[in-house]
Amino acid sequence: MSNLLIYNSLTRTTQKFEPINPPYVGMYVCGPTVYGPAHLGHARPAVTFDLIFRYLRYLGYKVRYVRNITDVGHLEHDADEGDDKIAKKAKLENLEPMEVVQTYTEDYHKNMRLLNCLPPSIEPHASGHIIEQQQLIDKILANGYAYESNGSVYFDIKKYAEKYRYGKLSGRNVEDLLEKTRTLDGQDEKRNQCDFALWKKASPAHIMHWPSKWSEGFPGWHLECTAMSTKYLGEYFDIHGGGMDLQFPHHECEIAQSVGALGHDAVKYWVHNNMITINGKKMGKSLGNAMTLEQFFAGEHELLEQPYSPMTVRFFILQAHYRSTLDFSNEALQASEKGLEKLLSAVKALETLTPGKTSSFSVSEFKEKCFDAINDDFNTPVMISHLFEGVKHINLIKDGKESLNEADLNELKKLYNDLCFEILGLRAEEEKSDNSEIIGSLVDMIQQLRQQAKSEKNYALSDKLRDELNRAGVKIKDTKTGYEWSF
Ligand code: ZN
């Protein structure tokens, strides 16, 4: 179906993409923990896997894209310790935890729409899959890779390591992990420090808990992804994605859980995007450079010289390969903003070009180069550089210095449309300020007609004009001094 090559983080090799059951492709991506506004760190995995989703669909695959919402079990500090992030926020703001979840899920969706990320096919919540998670624990317990201790259930790394390789994804050495004898309070119920929780007994202060045969408690963070991915995509599926920071412990634990429960790895290709830095520094709350997407789009952060539109951010992310680090700086973003403008105005100009008799360059070769790039593990920076090379040709044709025959010109138009909009997921920015100016003067004009009708006592016409405006989404309010209007 394609010549797509994909890098597998598990084998550390680039492999030919061959789905388990073509034309179907199952893709699971770790979604956000919804305890705060969507931030810049959310943008990169979202755009990366949106690109992959879009491209696989473009190639004709029927993709089932599952991205979860983590609304229980993700604890502060590390996977097993501290407060639940959502419960903590709920206590702080005196809200029901599900109110926190609802608020920030909405916020996440809104920002994803702005970034033009397509919604996933299924977006399951961890809290809606407690039974599936408990069933998974039963299987792991029955296979002897977990143990119950004081109402909690832990995965037994030492036992697992006798037969399987724990650490194969992250490259960690299990001997080192087992040797570490870091002791923390309340950790003694584990056999080994590196054992991780599948089920945790809730303390009396813990507000999110469910009944189980082990205790009134809640599932461990890693478990949700294994439970939901295999529920919706089956015991074998094609792609599991997420940020590189999730490789350990989250994804390593997912592998152990699925091997522990099913006897095999569920995932064929593990795909990880690299991280974002800001002015060369890691992004983090403690570093004072964490910013929400809303702040970013509005330019409201001390590190930002100006607002950056969602499309600039999307284009900027795509101008780097997803496995490279990406440094956000004003300079780089401004360059992307200009580049995007140049690209989109060339696409607009392309639509108006007329064919010549002969072709001065080969569109088929050009097309091949573009697809070779994206087929090479989604190499968008190289593909975009080809697109810019094509912009030179478009401008030369516009100036009458080059030409394309009709078939080639149509081919080039389709190519730019497919690559820019369908695959890269760009969209022409709405020229809002211009539009509202035009609408403003139209409203003024209609309002003058209304005044004239009123002065001629033609109230039927005056009301009709107001109603028509209403129907078009413009609300008119007559005031003492004149009128006000709004959308
Ligand atoms: Zn996950």
Image (tube, helix red, strand yellow):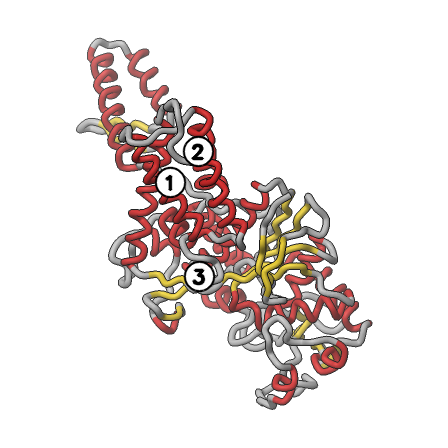
Tell me if mark 1 has few (under 14), some (14-19) or many (20+) residues whose alpha carbon lies within 10 angstroms of its own.
some
Q: Residue 341 vs residue 163: left or right?
A: left
The residue singled out by tag 2 in the image is 412
Residue 390, label in figure:
1
Vertical position of residue 72 compared to residue 317: above or below: below
Q: Amino acid at mark 1?
A: Gly
> What residue lies at 76% left-to-right and 70% top-to-bottom?
140
Label 3 residue SS: helix
> What residue lies at 23% left-to-right and 24% top-to-bottom?
444
- Which numbered disc flags the more N-terminal residue, 2 or 1? 1
Q: Amino acid at mark 2?
A: Leu
Label 2 residue SS: helix
Task: Compute the Cα span from label 3 to label 1.
Answer: 32 Å
Cβ–Cβ below 8 Å for labels 2 and 1? yes
> What residue lies at 39% left-to-right and 70% top-to-bottom?
282
- Image-quarter location of ligand 1: bottom right
The residue singled out by tag 3 in the image is 41
